[in-house]
Image: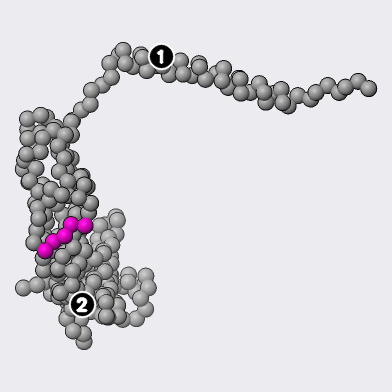
C-alpha cells in the first residue's frame, strides 16, 4: 500500500508570519501543484515527510495526498528546505504525478564490491557521480542503481555507459560521464635535482626578461623628449 499523507489546507495570509505559526503548531507549510490544477497551500506532518525522505526510495517515493474536500492525488516530494542550525524541515513542495506519463528524476548509484586496484595495487576508489538522472514511468523508478566495481583496476574507469540496462529506463547523463575510478593514493615527489633545475630555469627566465623591458622602454623615453628648435 502506498504511503498516505494527510494534509490540511492552510488558511489566512500566506506570508512568513503565517508560515511561522504553522511550524509553531508542529506542522510544515507545503504547496501541492501540478499540470491541470491550481496550486494548493497546505500543511503536513513533519514526521511523515521525514519518514518518506529517509526511506529506501527517498524523494522519489510516490504517495497519496489526501486533502479535506479535494480528491486524493498521487504526488512526489520535489523540493524541501531545512533550517540550517537545527536541521529541521521548514517547507515542502509536492508535485502531482500522472502514473501514465514519464518523469525525469535522479537516482542514487550504489557501488558494490572492492576494486582489484584497491586490494592488489594500493589504489583508492573515487566515487565521482553519486546520482544519475533517468527518465521512465513512475512505477519503473528504481530505489537505487547497483554498479559492480570488483574488476576495476588501478587507473580504471567506469562510466555511465557501464551502468546496468534497466527495463524502460533511459539514462539522461552523458554516456562518457565518469561514475567511479581507482586512483593512486600518492604521487611521486620531485627529486632534489628536479627542484634545483626548476629554480635555475625560473631565475634564468626572470633575468632574460629584464633587457626586453629596458629595450621596450627606451623608444618611449626618446619619443617623449622634445627635439631642439632650429636656429633662425
Residue 13 versus residue 216 in the image, above or below: below
Quadrant of the image containing the C terminus:
top right
Q: Which mark is residue 154?
A: none
Quadrant of the image containing the N terminus:
bottom left
Q: Residue 212 in the image: x percent, y percent?
A: 56, 20
Q: Which residue is mark 1?
A: 200
The tally of labels here is 2
| Residue 25 seen anywhere in this rendered image of the structure | no
Q: Which residue is mark 2?
A: 7
Local crowd size for mark 1, using a 10 Å CA cut-off: few (<14), some (14–19), many (≥20): few
Q: Is residue 170 magenta?
A: yes
**Magenta stretch: helix, strand or loop mostly:** loop
| Residue 140 seen anywhere in this rendered image of the structure | yes
Image depth: mark 1 or mark 2 in front: 1
Q: Residue 171 in the image: x percent, y percent?
A: 18, 57
Q: SS at mark 2? A: strand
- The image quarter containing residue 39 is bottom left
Depth check: give the residue in front, 78 or 91: 78
Kindly identify the residue that appears in the image at 80 percent across and 23 percent down. Answer: 227
Q: Is residue 109 magenta?
A: no
Kindly identify the residue that appears in the image at 26 percent across and 64 percent down. Answer: 79
Amino acid at each position: 500500500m502506498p504511503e498516505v499523507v494527510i494534509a490540511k489546507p492552510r488558511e489566512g495570509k500566506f506570508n512568513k508570519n503565517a508560515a511561522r505559526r504553522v511550524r509553531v503548531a508542529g506542522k510544515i507549510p507545503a504547496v501541492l501543484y501540478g499540470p491541470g490544477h491550481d496550486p494548493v497551500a497546505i500543511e503536513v506532518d513533519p514526521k511523515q515527510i521525514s519518514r518518506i525522505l529517509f526511506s529506501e526510495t527517498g524523494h522519489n517515493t510516490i504517495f497519496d495526498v489526501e486533502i479535506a474536500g479535494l480528491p486524493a492525488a498521487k504526488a512526489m516530494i520535489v523540493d524541501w528546505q531545512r533550517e540550517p542550525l537545527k536541521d529541521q524541515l521548514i517547507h515542502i513542495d509536492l508535485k502531482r504525478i500522472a502514473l501514465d506519463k514519464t518523469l525525469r528524476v535522479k537516482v542514487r548509484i550504489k557501488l558494490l564490491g572492492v576494486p582489484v586496484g584497491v586490494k592488489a595495487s594500493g589504489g583508492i576508489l573515487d566515487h565521482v557521480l553519486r546520482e544519475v538522472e533517468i527518465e521512465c514511468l513512475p512505477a519503473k523508478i528504481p530505489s537505487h542503481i547497483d554498479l559492480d566495481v570488483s574488476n576495476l583496476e588501478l587507473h580504471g574507469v567506469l562510466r555511465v555507459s557501464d551502468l546496468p540496462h534497466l527495463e524502460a529506463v533511459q539514462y539522461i547523463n552523458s554516456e562518457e560521464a565518469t561514475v567511479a575510478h581507482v586512483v593512486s593514493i600518492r604521487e611521486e615527489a620531485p627529486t632534489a635535482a628536479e627542484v634545483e633545475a626548476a629554480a635555475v630555469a625560473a631565475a634564468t627566465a626572470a633575468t632574460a626578461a629584464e633587457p626586453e623591458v629596458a629595450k621596450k622602454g627606451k623608444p618611449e623615453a626618446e619619443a617623449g623628449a622634445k627635439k631642439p628648435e632650429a636656429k633662425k
